Amino acid sequence: MRRAAGGRGRRRRGAALDPDPPPASLPQDLGHDPAAPTTRLYATAAAQPWHNDSADLVSLLCLSPAAKGGASRWSSSAAIYNSLLASNPAAVATLTARGTWYYDRKGEVPAGKEGFFEMPILNFVDGAPSSLAGATPSGGRLAVNLSSNYYVSAQRFPEVPRLTDAQRSAVASVEALADSPAFALAHDLAPGDIQLLNNHVCLHTRSAFEDGEGAVRHLLRLWLAPETEGPLPAVYEELYGGSLAVGARGGIRVDGVMLKERDVHVSLEAA
Ligand SMILES: [Fe+2]
């Protein structure tokens, strides 16, 4: 199993803020501007929309909660998909369509690549379903990649096609279902609590928070690539840094740190 987590750009409280910090990798308020196009919202105190992380599993260990807010919620994207397929198959078709969804790399651009890549929100291991008319698509295993913030911010690139009303409506439908009590669980992470989610079939979100004197929200995140996970569709290659090998995929690829060997991992506090 690969463990991949990092702390690039992390700033201890009271330390000087790098005027041009690299994207951070810990869910903690680092003082980044949530409105900046390359900001990843987990490094701010702003609310995060429903999303999944870029790994098979995501674990969070709560060391200390915020003074106010920061509530976590989780929702089954597989259940949302099933519901949407029954109630709004046109939205499913929109969320599955190739060549229409473009994902912002938010400044983490590998050499020779563009600042964005194409990737639908609904994906299937055995290819896109040939027909959505039936109760289930003909494709195989579902893998959901919903991070609306990334698809919206990719609109800053003029060469990226504009999001259509149908696309925005389809995302809103997913988010509304995710919010519904039928699919969502809510929990305030307390010190010692651990969250463990499968990103392909679960979405998560977090409300805005405020730190206070003696109450600074501090969570450690761990991304896991279990050897028991199933295959992913080829479209995940860009999101996962080129490797879709079970047990060795996902996470953040840092220059000079190549995770090719089994059991090699990056420290949670790596600089
Ligand atoms: Fe997340």
Image: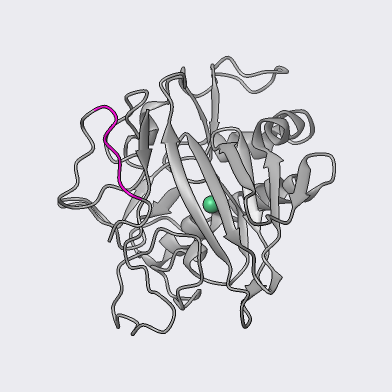
Q: Is residue 65 above or below residue 194?
A: below
Q: Is residue 52 above or below residue 72?
A: above
Q: Quadrant of the rendered structure where residue 52 is?
A: top right
Q: Quadrant of the C terminus?
A: bottom left
**Left or right: 260 as drawn, with respect to 213:** left
Q: Is residue 101 visible?
A: no
Q: Is residue 161 visible?
A: yes
- State the colouring used for the structure image: one colour
Per the image, is 266 magenta? yes
Per the image, is 231 magenta? no
**Left or right: 165 as drawn, with respect to 30:** right
Q: Position of residue 164 (x, y in %)?
A: 56, 55
Q: Quadrant of the N terminus?
A: top left
| Residue at 42 percent of width and 68 percent of height | 39
Q: Position of residue 204 (x, y in %)?
A: 63, 48
Segment tinted magenta in the rendering? 262-267
**Left or right: 147 as drawn, with respect to 264:** right
Main secondary-structure element of the magenta-colored stretch: loop
Q: Position of residue 240 (x, y in %)?
A: 34, 39
| Residue at 64 percent of width and 56 percent of height | 191
